[in-house]
Image (cartoon, rainbow, N blue to C red):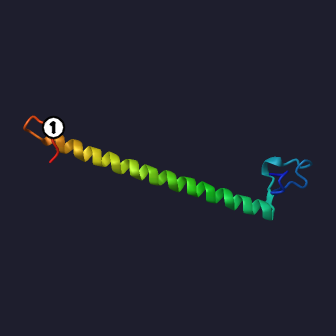
Amino acid sequence: MIEKGMIKTENFLTSDHKAVYIYHLTPAGIEERARMTIRFLKKKSEEYERLKDDLRRLEQNDAAARVISQNTDGFFSVR
């Protein structure tokens, strides 16, 4: 990020308190961070939708299995 000009590191090398050093994002760094955030949120949203679909399918399969198990005539049929 330093090489790409996204953060400034003035005085970092000479600082005795590197653990608490604050990075200042440049305008390019802010833009890249925004793009990264959008990509992350899009990926998580797609993952959420896939999980919802999977859950819906599992619930449908469970409901169908319950109907089949309630069938008392000895045959496997769905009502």
Between residue 1 and residue 10, name the one nearer to us: 1
Q: Is 16 on the left or on the right of 55, as rendered?
A: right
* Residue 53 placement (x, y as % from top left): 40, 51
Tally the marks. Answer: 1
Q: Is 13 on the left or on the right of 22, as rendered?
A: right
The residue to which callout 1 is attached is 76
| Corner quadrant of residue 36 | bottom right
69 lies above or below 57: above
Residue at image point 35% right, 51% down:
56
3 lies above or below 29: above
- Please rate how many residues cluster around mark 1, counting C-alpha atoms within 10 Å: few if below 14, some from 14 to 19, many from 20: few
* Residue 4 placement (x, y as % from top left): 83, 53
* Residue 31 placement (x, y as % from top left): 73, 63
Q: Is 21 on the left or on the right of 58, as rendered?
A: right
Q: Residue furthest left?
A: 73
* Residue 63 placement (x, y as % from top left): 24, 47
Residue at image point 77% right, 59% down:
29
Residue at image point 37% right, 48% down:
55
Between residue 33 and residue 11, name the one nearer to us: 33
Helix, strand or loop for disc 1: loop
Q: Residue furthest bottom?
A: 27
Give the amino acid at mark 1: Phe
Between residue 1 and residue 71, name the one nearer to us: 71
Between residue 6 and residue 14, name the one nearer to us: 6
Residue at image point 17% right, 41% down:
68
Q: Is 74 on the left or on the right of 13, as rendered?
A: left
